[in-house]
Image (tube, rainbow, N blue to C red):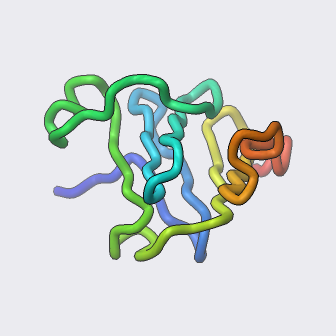
Amino acid sequence: MNDKNFRVSGRNTIIHKNRKIDLLLVNGDHPVIIVNHTGIGLYKGVLPEKRIDAKRAHQELIDLCKPDVFGQEKTLVFIEALDNKEYKLDYSKINTENFIKVHQENYI
């Protein structure tokens, strides 16, 4: 049984499903993003090398470039988090305050 802790919706949206698991989003050489049940931010820790290491740390590593996710690097990604907000990641605006923004306050 391959139950994922996220769902892909459309061409550039990730939906977080499980509040016990944090999502680590990898998009090429860009900074890694962590999504948890309280929000979203830049990940400053060490990336787990194996999937089992991530599972022990209650994390799931998501490479957006893999074919089962998006299949290519994305410039714009939307994240529907469990804090009832939709976030917009604009990778063309890295190192600015507009890199991670709240897109919708209540998406449900």
Is residue 34 shown left or right of residue 83? left
The residue positioned 73% from the left and 42% from the top of the image is 100
Counting every numbered tag in the picture gives: 0
The residue positioned 37% from the left and 57% from the top of the image is 63
Which one is in front, 20 or 43? 43
The residue positioned 45% from the left and 54% from the top of the image is 29
Which one is in front, 106 or 72? 72
Rendered position, 91 above or below 43: below
The residue positioned 63% from the left and 51% from the top of the image is 79
Percent position of residue 43, x then y: 49, 30
Q: Residue 56, located in which quarter of the rendered image? A: top left
Is residue 88 shown left or right of residue 1? right
Percent position of residue 49, x then y: 19, 38
- Quarter occupied by the N terminus: bottom left
Percent position of residue 31, x then y: 52, 43
Percent position of residue 81, x then y: 62, 41
Rendered position, 43 above or below 13: above
